Image (cartoon, grey):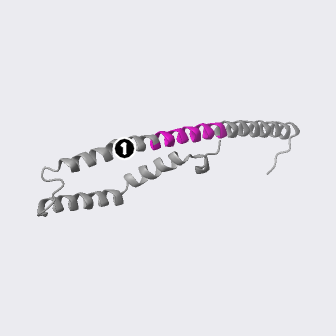
Amino acid sequence: MHITKAHYTFRDRLADFIAKWGGSWEFISLLAVCIGIWVIVNIYAYFQRWDPYPFIFLNLVLALVTVFQAPVILMSQNRQSDIDRLRAEHDFIVNKKTEEEVRELKAQLDRIEKKLGATGKRPK
């Protein structure tokens, strides 16, 4: 039940990378810089404005980024929730075994205490 990244497929690792990168300040900063450059170039370009105001093509590009990025992030989150569920199940099993061992130890201590009480020998 041990989960490692070695069990991930290429697509799993790619989804995790995109989710991690897409949720970072570096991505947001890079996106802001790219949008700023896009807008400035298209406002001040004298020739070949490929996307004049109101930047319809920019909106399309950003929508496409969202369309592809959102499901990939959801896939990564689903895999992470599966991993968390498996860990919780593992923790539950370990806790149950620990509880059984503690009960056995308590029973043994009770038996020892009864034997010591029956002989009248008590440690000081």
What's the residue at 57%, 39% (across, down)?
Answer: 88
Q: Is residue 105 magenta?
A: no
Where residue 36 appears, x then y in whole percent?
21, 60
Please give the range of residues in magenta: 76-94
Q: Quadrant of residue 100?
A: top right
Where residue 114 appears, x then y in whole percent?
82, 36
35 on left or right of 111: left
Please name whichever residue, 58 or 95, is drawn nearer the observer in this view of the structure.
58
What's the residue at 42%, 43% (across, down)?
Answer: 72
Where residue 70 appears, x then y in whole percent?
36, 42
Badge 1 crowding class, 10 Å Cα cut-off, few under 14, some 14 to 19, many 20 or more, is few
| Residue wearing tag 1 | 68
40 on left or right of 33: left
Label 1, secondary structure: give it.
helix
Q: Is residue 77 magenta?
A: yes
What's the residue at 16%, 62% (across, down)?
Answer: 40
